[in-house]
Amino acid sequence: DDLAGSVLLCLKMLTLVLGREGDFLGLLRQQRPGGGGPGVPVVSSLCELLMGVNPHSKRADHLLNVARFVTQDVPTPELPLAALEVLLHTCRSFRANSHLLNTVTLHTSVSQEVLHGFVDCLECENGHHGRTPEEQAIAQVYQSVQCTLLELLLMEKNPFGLFLLGFDTKAVMADDEDFTLQDPGVLGAPRTCLHSVLYLLERNQGPTTTSAGYSKGGGGGPGCHHSHPRLAELCYLLLHGLCTSRHLSAPTLRYLRHNHDFFCRQLSHLPDLLGAIASSGSGTSEDEFTSEGGVLTYMDGGDSGMESGLLSADQVSVLFQQARFLQMVAVEMRVTHLSQQHSYNQRLINLLLTNSSQPFGGGGGDGWSTNQTTAAAYQSDYDLQHHQEQRRLLAFLALVSFRDIPVPPLQVEAFDAGALERVVGSCGAACQLTGLRYTDVRRLHSLLMGELSAVHGPSGQRQTVVEEIHNVLRVVVQRNRVRTTCHAYHSFLSSWQQLVKVMLASMSADPVHSDLKVNVLFELIQELQLKVEQPGNRELGALVHGLLFTLMTHVRQAAAFSSRLPPSASTSIHDGSSANSGSGAAVFSRPLHAVLGNLVASALAESSGPQGVRIHIYGSLLCYLQ
């Protein structure tokens, strides 16, 4: 125990120095020789020292020794956590990252040992249960180990991370996309961190048969989406980065598609996930929001609930993870459409357009007839809120609230309001993983306490300033919550919009199912118009109006296509019963009457709104007139 404690303190000391050496070296560079001051000393960074030769082993294996602590075969889970924090700092240097990869892969036994340790830590079950306070504290450490390991894999320009994920680093560097990812044991392939990530996301899902002919998976719903949303968010973020990478997307998508049927299985379990999100409470303590979201860095106590309209930390993580998943589905749909994999692409579209409560079938049947109604059925009295069967694609919109969330103002007496707003603005920061802009509350607290030290007066006046500082910090925390909620909604809706556009583009190439496309278009238009008919969030409204313009463009194209068809062919698109219904365009325009009123109302309401929104509304009206 004493030796483990000493090693832990050494790793923590390395982490502390690595985190502060940048500021220290920056101060040294500011010094200039001469001028009465001492010259600039010759120093080396700790990262370079860790790449040096170990006097005991006569090899440059300092980083390898640190990486060997990332395993479960240690007395305490704090050891792999401290080792991962050291690697997280050092691997930001591409030179150190490559050095670690070369050291680990020099011998096969060493590389297998290190890879096995990382996989064991990522698949650890100890972080998913805990009854007593001691067990819960240990479980929290194991969860931190998993999240820190995923953050290490998410780093850019990361050859060591590619090795942990099972990619051939030489092939990646040579831009070779022909290499193939395999399941563990196939052709001698080891179990990698990519397999562990998929295991976390599919741990409790129903069994499926892989291309190798064996069954895997459990039963009962999504993986860690409910129990650990932050962990699932990082897993989806990692897969999204692989699927959108220029060098890694082709082998990653092939493996997910053929070996795991990942996208279809995840889409089939979305009703369970969305129902759990809708039924979950929105209240959370401020400490929970701080630890999970990674955005709010101050407030030790406070209210136990959140104001109406704000999301909890778990709900924010779920929105971010599903936003990444929808982007991956859009990429997969585009790739399979361009590569003419029509049956698989049709299977994805079928999952999005069928009833959200319908169980997923493993077969590849087309299912295009599900929930099909003719376009003539959509009259002015059509109301999607009373639609009993909702498509999976529309069920996503239930997660987004279009209400405007007010930003709390700063009310101060001891400080100048304008100067205080400038100080708050100077404390802005951004989350590297999600792109969220927020206020660094720790930095703001330090600045305000510095102002407090300059206050000289009676103790009562000083106490008043302290209370006002705490009130300012509470308001800034609330602003961070509002920004987090709005950013989560915006990110999710943008991803959903991207998926809708890719899906419609894929359906446009298949004129046989033009009637289904017309039905889907009018359902989407009606649902989106219901979302924006009340005053709400302007950023989300701008996204919706842009998508409405795209949908109206598809409606115009469908109308032009139907007008060129003979009467015998156009009746199946319009009403299916009127053989002498006259012009196809005349019959097609009937469901548009339900849309015209909302378009005109939006044009009047946004007459003085942003120019981009007005352009989209007027474009939609032009498409309607055409």
Image: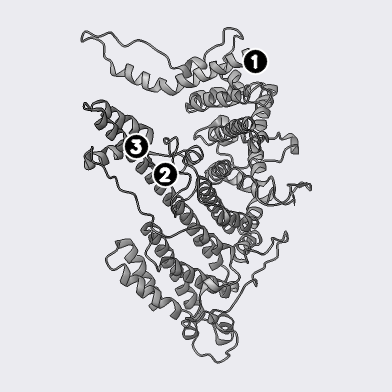
Q: Nearer the viewer, residue 568 or 621?
A: 621
Instruction: State how far apart marks 2 and 1 are (Cα).
Output: 42 Å
Residue under pointer 1:
1
Q: Quadrant of residue 17?
A: top left
Q: Is residue 169 visible?
A: no
The numbered mark at residue 436 is: 2
Q: Amino acid at mark 3?
A: His
Q: Residues within 10 Å of mark 3 (few under 14, many from 20)?
A: some
Image coordinates for residue 274, horizontal then vertical, percent: 58, 56
- Badge nearest the viewer, 2 or 1: 1
In this rendering, the answer to whether 542 lies above or below 618 is above
Residue under pointer 3:
470
Q: Amino acid at mark 1?
A: Asp
In this rendering, the answer to whether 263 lies above or below 9 is below
Q: Quadrant of residue 187?
A: top right
The numbered mark at residue 593 is: none
Residue drawn 49% across the image and 26% down it: 89
Query: Of label 2 and label 1, which has the lower sequence position?
Result: 1
**Image quadrant containing the C terminus:** bottom left
Query: Of label 3 and label 2, which has the lower sequence position?
Result: 2
Coloring applied to the structure: one colour
* Disc 2 element: loop
